Amino acid sequence: MLQLSELGLYLHIPFCERKCPYCDFNTYAGMEASFQPTVDALCAEMEQWADLLAERTVKTVFLGGGTPTVLQDEQLFQLLEGVKRCFRLAPEVEITSEANPGTVDRSRFALLRSLGVNRLSMGVQSLRADELRWLGRIHTVEDVYMAYAAARQAGFTNINLDFIFGLPEQSPTAWQETLTQVVALAPEHVSLYSLIVEPNTPLFHWVKSGQVPAPDEDLAAQLYEMTLEQLAQAGYLHYEVSNWARQRSPADNLDETLHFASRHNLVYWRNGDYLGVGPGAHSHLRSQGPQGLVERRWGNRRPVPSYVRRAHRREKLTEFVEEISPRLAMGESMMVGLRLVREGVPHRRFEQLHGVAATAVFAQELALLEEAGLLHVDNERIRLTPHGLLMGNQVFMQFLPES
């Protein structure tokens, strides 16, 4: 029986000091005058949900963007106090804030800790000066080390570092040196993403016009395999396609309390419920209706001025609302769940979510993928094989219904 009690909460802060050329997120630079009105609007949106979600417990909170740490101290205080006022937080709630090394100092980290933030996610992206310049980052390599040390001094014992690999003409030697430096820093969590050329970004136009070469997929695969080997040797647990965590206990256990997995992102990968607050934020919630369980997702309006105006007037904030069909919901559970390398899609959880066995719904797909050596199916779960891990996107698409 599915328990509709816990959910994740995401707060979107749509501001950066500078917009990176590869980024397609709903973020903006040079809008300092909009900081306070937007913070007020986020608080107003949270207040609209307070009564509706009074019976739900928020198990994770994530301040993302954008760069939340570009906000002033008083604005961060206002946001996090709003969270505590409007929602019932779990006793062991995970509260994460994203941060960029170029926009923080020791006092800002100390403030976040005092407000209850217990996990930090820093957008490092590279530890090489030439790569940082190419990526358009505002920080230097020295800034990374200073920010990391300041976060430790402020008391953070759960830090994630984000990196991008597969840059045009990035050499395996350069990436291996970066991995060695990452391991030496010993963060509790590492997120490593292959560079993707997203439409409507400066990078997309640079590649299209021939100014820069397109990322080399074969090189990216080589760097990924290097990563798997090097981080495993360093004791990091590869628990999701792009994410590694140190273990709290040497026990080989899938329980996230025994390692530093991102509990907020696990909500997404387990196809759980989450509320997104802010311009462009997406939500996914289930509720009990007269005819049974209703599953919906929606997205807020993206433009900041429009979102702010509507939030202050208590008007409709959504850009779209979609009721998810049972078949699509099942396919999405497979698609996101298979990203969890070790956990995969447990049979029991799938049945709790959908009231039917995955092996019954996807018998043909599972048989074909297992025969191809891409999936492993046992009595407890369905998960990718090592070969399937390298072919993940092709595997995931097999479970989505044809449009």
Image (spheres, rainbow, N blue to C red):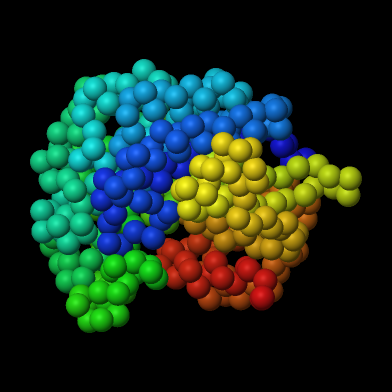
x, y (%) of residue 151? 25, 28
Q: Is residue 115 above or below residue 39?
A: above
Q: Is residue 2 left or right of residue 138?
A: right
Q: Position of residue 348 (x, y in %)?
A: 69, 47
Residue in the image at 24% along x and 33% along y: 104
In screen coordinates, is 50 left or right of 39? right
Q: Quadrant of residue 160?
A: top left
Compared with 381, 151 (above or below) is above
User: Seen from this angle, which residue lies furthest top?
Assistant: 114
Residue under the point 55% across and 52% down: 301
State whether residue 55 is above or below residue 218: above
Q: How far across and down, in percent of the image, does residue 62 sit?
A: 46, 37
* Residue beneath the point at 62% across and 50% down: 318
Quarter-wise, where is residue 226 in the image? bottom left
- Asked whether residue 391 appears in the rendered view, the answer is yes
Q: Is residue 255 at all visible to an observer of this figure?
A: no
Q: In the drawing, does residue 121 fall left or right of residue 170? A: right
Using the image as rendered, state which of residue 382 and residue 211 is in the foreground. Answer: 211
Q: Viewer-proximal residue, 171 or 4?
A: 4
- Of residues 48 and 104, which is closer to you in this image? 48
Name the quarter where the C terminus is drawn: bottom right
